[in-house]
Image (tube, rainbow, N blue to C red):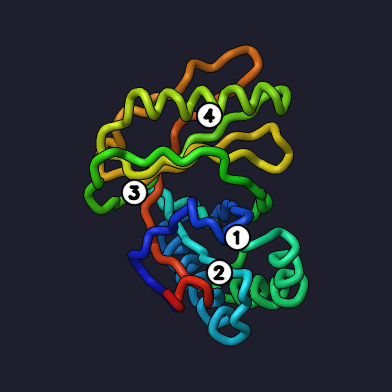
Amino acid sequence: MRTPRAWPDLARPEAGTVLISEWIVGTPERQRAAAKALLGEWEQLSARFRPEAFVQLACFASADGGVLLSHAQWASDEAHLAFVRAHRAAMVSRIDQKVPGIERPGLMRFRLLHSIVPETAPEPADAIVVVGARARTAEDARQWADGLAAELRETPAAGWGPAHVLVRTDGLHVLLHAPTTRADHGGVPLPAPTAEVQVHPPQHYHLVGSVRGPRCTRR
């Protein structure tokens, strides 16, 4: 079921894996067309095959019109890979017929490490802020992620909803994902970069739409 303004909950207990991918589309017109095609494909696939392990897919658009960011939640990597083997090639082919030339750098698999929920209920979000970091070692990544979570709990960011800190399955990449109501996206309270951790500039996106799987639509 497509839910255009339903924000994904990265802390859902049944979601064992979070899959994040970036599509480089180039222009606002291609961005809109690609988002429509992606959401339409997932809506049809979810309704037709009703994969029990599929939780939700959400599609976000960059403000400059050049990028789509999607993240999907599944019960496990194994269930997602089985579904991909059966359906991805045909789905991508249909999308590429509608929007040729999409660049897909690759899918990244993450695990949820921390969720920081504000004490007061935030207003409905209209954007997300995403910050990525890459560490030299898995230990460095974990320490930076733990420090980020501690900083957010100590000094919550104004206008933010629940913030989530995820670690990639390679152990070296950390991702901060948080909805925000602030037009300027608020100040991002990040620990300082170190020689061991490279921090990328914050990126901002707005939600285009989402598709819920059988587990969500029954609730």
- Residue nearer the viewer, 131 or 27: 131
Q: Secondary structure at mark 1?
A: loop
Residue type for callout 2: Val
Is tag 4's residue or tag 1's residue first in the polypeptide sequence? 1
Residue on which the image places disc 4: 200
Residue on which the image places disc 3: 127
Q: CA distance from mark 2 to mark 3?
A: 25 Å
Q: CA distance from mark 4 to mark 1?
A: 23 Å
Q: CA distance from mark 4 to mark 3?
A: 18 Å
Question: Is 109 left or right of 66, judged from the image as shown?
Answer: right
Residue type for callout 3: Ala
Q: Residue furthest bottom?
A: 48
Residue on which the image places disc 2: 99
- Local crowd size for mark 4, using a 10 Å CA cut-off: few (<14), some (14–19), many (≥20): few
Q: Secondary structure at mark 3?
A: strand
Q: CA distance from mark 4 to mark 2?
A: 29 Å
Tell me residue 214's x, y (percent).
53, 77
Residues tagged 1 and 3 counted as in contact (Cβ below 8 A):
no
Kindly report which numbered mark, 2 or 3, lies closer to the viewer in this rendering: 3
**Residue shown at 57% from the left, 51% from the top:** 22
Residues tagged 4 and 1 counted as in contact (Cβ below 8 A):
no
Tell me residue 125's x, y (percent).
29, 51
Q: Which mark is residue 102?
A: 1
Residue type for callout 1: Ile
- Residue 64 seen: no
Q: Secondary structure at mark 4?
A: loop
Quadrant occupied by the C terminus: bottom left
- Local crowd size for mark 2, using a 10 Å CA cut-off: few (<14), some (14–19), many (≥20): some
Residues tagged 2 and 1 counted as in contact (Cβ below 8 A):
yes
Question: Is 177 left or right of 84, judged from the image as shown?
Answer: left
Is tag 4's residue or tag 3's residue first in the polypeptide sequence? 3
Q: Secondary structure at mark 2?
A: loop
